[in-house]
Image (cartoon, rainbow, N blue to C red):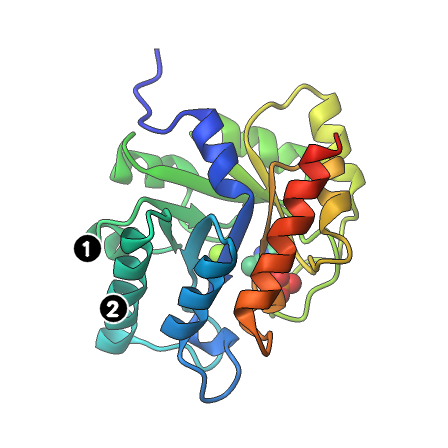
Amino acid sequence: MSTRAWQDDAIREALRLYFIMGSNNCLPGVDPVQVLSEAIRGGVSLFQFREKGSGALVGDARVELAWRLRELCREHRIPFIVNDDVELALEVDADGVHVGQEDEAASTVRRLIGDAKLLGVSAYDEREAETAIRCGADYLGIGPLFSTRTKEDAKDASGLDVLTQMRELGMRIPIVGIGGITDGNAAEVIRAGADGISLISAISLAQDPFAASNRLRQVVDAAFAGM
Ligand code: TZP
Ligand code: MG
């Protein structure tokens, strides 16, 4: 029997519109707290704090921003996940941790965070997905599905077949697609087998993050309603 606190159905629900952001993903001069606040109002269902890459905050400023975003999520009952930093996740009592293939091993992270917190793992293909599941992932982030300019070291876009194939292979774990997702391709991602879409720039760089997330949420909900 699993002692995991999170059930798959609750995870799937949370993955619907999964917003990822760090301060350096926002337009110049725009407050990330304001962006997340508007994005939640528009329909974001889960948030990941990813403060990395060029221009990212470090030290106390990074921790302070994590706290502010964490509190905002708590206020709105939105799960708050920290990218690739178990120590920070424990410090702010995040709901989970997300790691990529180059980060700390998923099995190590699971041991450190226990079964009460969510563990998300990025995977590019079926092989990485299988390993992540074995190492204790609660959900997978599959991508980049489409080309992205946000992640400096991103692999080539895989296209949607990887999602279809994972489902055909019988992988039932909650999955969120990532990489170059917009309101124009979000419905295809859902129809290919994802439980939700995760994205950065389609919301973080939008002139109106409320309108952008509201539109994305409508597209995702409509895609599920039509299946
Ligand atoms: N992992 C794979 S692609 C990506 C990450 C973090 C970046 C996604 O950003 P965008 O702006 O939604 O393409
Ligand atoms: Mg990473």
Q: Is residue 1 left or right of residue 138?
A: left
Disc assigned to residue 201 = none
- Tell me the residue that label 1 is attached to: 91
Percent x, y of residue 92? 22, 55
Residue for point 29% across, 72% down: 62
Query: Looking at the picture, does residue 199 appear above or below residue 5?
Result: below
Residue 29 showing in the rendered view: yes
Tell me which residue sits at (47%, 48%) in the image. Answer: 45
- Disc 2 Cβ-to-ligand 2 distance below 8 Å: no
Quick check: 189 above or below 5? below
Q: Residues within 10 Å of mark 1 (few under 14, many from 20)?
A: few
Secondary structure beneath label 1: helix
User: Which quadrant is home to the N terminus?
Assistant: top left
> According to the image, label 2 marks what residue?
63
Mark 1–mark 2 CB contact (< 8 Å): yes
Residue 23 pos. (x, y %): 42, 75
Report helix, strand or loop for mark 2: helix
Q: Say above or below: 108 vs 102.
A: above
In the image, what residue type sits under mark 1? Answer: Glu
